[in-house]
Amino acid sequence: AQKITQTQPGMFVQEKEAVTLDCTYDTSDQSYGLFWYKQPSSGEMIFLIYQGSYDEQNATEGRYSLNFQKARKSANLVISASQLGDSAMYFCAMRDRYMDSNYQLIWGAGTKLIIKP
Amino acid sequence: DAMVIQNPRYQVTQFGKPVTLSCSQTLNHNVMYWYQQKSSQAPKLLFHYYDKDFNNEADTPDNFQSRRPNTSFCFLDIRSPGLGDAAMYLCATSSGTGMPYEQYFGPGTRLTVT
């Protein structure tokens, strides 16, 4: 069965430091996609970055990069030069072809990130 | 800017009193989703539409219904809210025609049941 594991319930990081948020996944499909979302305290879920299983290069979007290690089934989010506004809940999610619908995601439990000034 | 809009942002209803939450989108996406999210938990999918094709999750209570009268609008009806239905309700959309089907979310409606 598909599963997403985020082992860090919470993290404190000093402003301007880099942050790595862990995500491991389990799927028997060869074709799948991995997503990271940010949810500030206001509640809106914000799409950050996507990695496809066949993408050879790690995805990057501005200060966000995804450290994709396929053999280890990990898809860690790296935030460079953290800012106070990065304080939020972060969710890792996955889609594969064995889901009931192409349009559904499996979600991890989330990591609460707090940036200290 | 193209976006997903949810109204109201905060809704208070009484135990057992029907309530409707609304969602609209200007992205012209085929797929619309409703999620329930309780404090410090991942969002839980209630149902989704591909155009007018409705897909209900197996564990979504019958108390929850949805309507999608056109591409732009989708409604969540809670017929008899219980205290356990107090949560954040998130609407999301995704394009059904191009990978990777990332989902775009509205700001959510926080429901309180008194």
Image: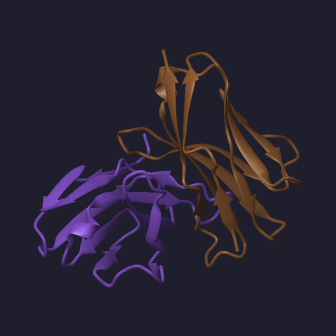
Chain colours: A brown, B purple
Q: Residue at x 84, y 66 (%)?
A: A30
Position of B38 relative to B46 (above/below): above
Q: Is residue B81 above or below residue B105?
A: below
Q: Quadrant of residue A77?
A: top right
Image quadrant holding the C terminus of chain B, namely bottom left
Image coords of residue B104 (percent x, y) = 50, 52
- Name which residue lies at 44% across and 45% down: B2
Compared with residue B1, is residue B52 higher up or lower down, i.e. above or below?
below
Direction from residue A113 to residue B79 in the image, left or right: left
Pick the front one: A50 or B16 = B16
Residue B98 lies, in percent from the top left, at: 66, 60
Q: Nearer the viewer, residue A62 or B110?
A: B110
Q: Quadrant of residue A22?
A: top right
Front residue of B100/A22: it is: A22
Q: Residue at x 38, y 57 (%)?
A: B90
User: In the rendered view, does B50 fall on the left or right side of B110?
Assistant: right
Residue A62 appears in the picture as rendered: no
Please provide percent x and percent y for residue A20.
68, 34
Residue B67 visible = yes
Q: Position of residue A101 (x, y in %)?
A: 61, 75
Describe residue A65's horizontal placement relative to residue B39 as left or right: right
